[in-house]
Every structure is written in C-alpha cells, then in structure tokens.
Image (cartoon, rainbow, N blue to C red):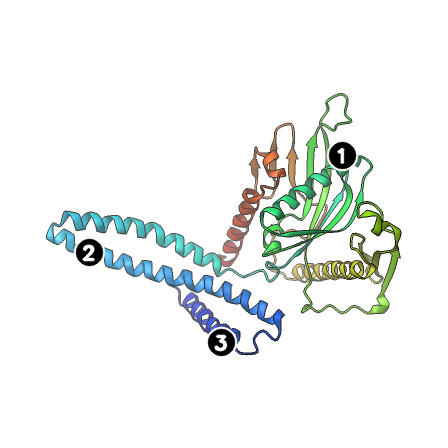
Amino acid sequence: MKQSLRTKLNTLFDRLEEVDLLLSLPNATDNMQEFAKLSRERNELAEVTDTYKQLQTAETDLQNSQRLLNEAQATNDAEMLELAELEIAELKEKIPQLDSQLEKLLLPKDPDDHKNVVLEIRAGTGGDESALFSGDLFRMYSRYAESKGWRVEILSSNESDLGGYKEIVAQISGENVYAALKFESGAHRVQRVPETETQGRVHTSACTVAILPEAEETEEININPADLRIDTYRASGAGGQHIQKTDSAVRITHLPTGITAECQDGRSQHSNKASAMKVLISRLLNIQKEKERSERADLRKSLVGSGDRSERIRTYNFPQGRLTDHRINLTLYKLTDILSGNLDEVINALATEFQAEQLANLND
C-alpha cells in the first residue's frame, strides 16, 4: 500500500475516534443539525475503515492459506491441499474487490450528496406533446422516489390544456436524494407518435430537467431583503377549493439576478413563502457553485449536470421501446419499465462511469 494512502487511512481512523467522542458527549444532541452532520460523517468514515479492516483480514488470511498450501504439498495431505487451494482462489477474488471498493470510498465526496433536492421540469420544443412528456417524467421520478421511501411535494405547477405540465417544481426529501438524481439535469428528448397525429408520424419534442441540491440552514448566502420583491396571487390548478379562494400563492423575485421562485401548493401564504424562499436560495447557491467550478482551471467535463438546459443527455424512443443516455452511450430496450420508475439500472451506470472518471483524474 502506498504511504500516502496509509497516511490518509490513519487520518480517517483518528477522525473516527474524534467523531465518536463528540457524539458521546452529554450535550451532543443540543444542536441537532450538528449532531446529524456528525452522524453522517461517522457513517461515511466507518464504511471506509470497516472496508480497510476487511481488506487487511483478507490479505492476512491469504498469507496463512499459502503457508497451509506449502505444508500440504510438503506432507502430501490431499485434503488440506484441496482446502488451501479453495481458500486461496476465493481470497484472490475477494481482495481485488475490496481494494477497488476501498479506492472508490476514498474518492473525494460531493458535500451535496446527502441533501434533498428541488426538481424542476419544463416543457420545451414540441408544444402540447412536450407538456405531456413533462408529466411522464414527473411520474417517473415520483415513482422512483416512492420506491426509495422518499417524499415528493409539489411546490408549483402549470398544467397544459391537454394534460401534463408546462412547468412543475417539486421538492424530493429523503436519504441521499441528490447523490442519486444529480445526473438527471439537462435536456430529455422524446420520440413518439402523438395521440393527435392522424398520419402515424413520429414527432420529436423535448423537456428540460434541473436537479438542485436544497440549501441547508447552515449554508450562508447573503441576500439583502431590499433585493427581494414578494408578490402574492390567487393560486390556480390543483389544490382544492381552499387554495383557490385566497391569495395564498407566493412569488419571490431576486431583483439583482432576476431569478424567481414561487409556490402555490401549500395550505397557507406563510408555508408557500417559506417554500419559495428555500427554492430561491437553492437556485442562487447552485449558480454560485457552478461559477466556482467553472473558475477552476483543472475542471474537466463531468457527468454531474449543471442544469444547462441546452445539453441533450437522454432520448426516450417509444416506437422502439428504447432509452439512450448519450453521455455514456447506454442503450436499454425497457422504456416502459424505466418510465414506471425503475431507474436503478440507469442511475447505477451513470454513478459507475462518474467514479471511473474521478479515478482517471486522480491517476493522471
């Protein structure tokens, strides 16, 4: 093992002891946000250190099995020889797997991975067909979230006349939501025959998806209240009689940037204002982070979407039942299954490619 890697692992073991001590203090739960942060850190550290311990044990077992093999050969003990050969074969398969797992665990962590997200889907080219596809995408993500035990809350929506959405914004809350969905930002293209098409021709339309890590209270972004314009209006669309009788919908505009955020699906103006403010801060933080990334000279092209809606990332071809992710040349002929929320195969492939990209960058 390289000395630099051993030094890093020793540092992680020391930090794990420190975090365990902090979590055991009598006043550890006085600040629940800090307690949750330390708990997440402890889980990450323990995963690394446990994997390293398993690797060390496997390497020691391999040495012992090789000694056992030598003894069996010297004494012509057929039974011991067979046992040693079997153990050596298993360990020689296990050790590279643990080594690879450890290498991935030691990659730089995305500090946003544990966060909830703000999901934004907007219809693009294609008119009503694009809006219908926005609805398909929202159902896909909602079902995927449901399968993970996450919570989906619609913050604002603008339905089209024929169904679907011209725009829909939702919050998805749960464990490691951003880690799973961060590769979804970009332009999603659909190819299918619209219901209104009488000649059976395949039409192409597109929607844009943006995945924004939700801002946490501990993250600082300076917003001058004088830079905000807050408008209230009567909500439209789904939400029930209560929501349509009062000016409960809220739109907040950040005047220096022109960025807006609105929420109309809450039950009160107060809750809508709080949700809209959270979305606004998430959007501003996302812009700030993208600016910081672009200013780093060593930044390479990454699979993590920036929310750039001009970047086509995926095509959904209905006549062929095919999904193609253009970033990693992934093609799957199970479109119905994927649109039903079974996204794991796509998301895992993207995550694997991203890890390979990180490893290549480290080894350059």
Q: Quadrant of the N terminus?
A: bottom left
Which residue is outermost to the top? Answer: 199
Q: Which residue is mark 1?
A: 129
Alpha carbon distance from label 3 to label 2:
42 Å
Count of picture labels:
3
- Indicate left or right for 311 with 298 as reference: right
Number of other residues with Cα within 10 Å of mark 1, as a class: few under 14, some 14 to 19, many 20 or more: many
Residue 39 is labelled as none
Image spot of residue 200 (x, y percent): 73, 22
**Mark 2: amino acid:** Leu
The residue where tag 3 is placed is 21
Helix, strand or loop at label 2? It is: helix
Q: Which element type, helix, strand or loop, lies under badge 1?
A: helix
Q: What kind of residue is marked 3?
A: Leu
Q: Residues within 10 Å of mark 3 (few under 14, many from 20)?
A: few
Which of 321/327 is in front?
321
Say which element carries label 3.
helix
Relative image position of residue 76 (x, y in whole percent): 11, 50
Task: From this view, report whether residue 314 is shown above or below residue 16.
Answer: above
Judge whether 274 appears above or below 93 on screen.
below
Would you say 187 lies left or right of 109 here? Answer: right
Give residue 318's position: percent from left, percent from top. Answer: 65, 30
Q: Earlier in the sequence, mark 3 or mark 2?
A: 3
What residue is at 72 percent from the left and 37 percent from the top?
A: 133
Which badge, 1 or 3, is on the more N-terminal residue? 3
Image position of 241 (left or right of 218): right
| Image disc number at residue 68 | 2
Q: Earlier in the sequence, mark 2 or mark 1?
A: 2
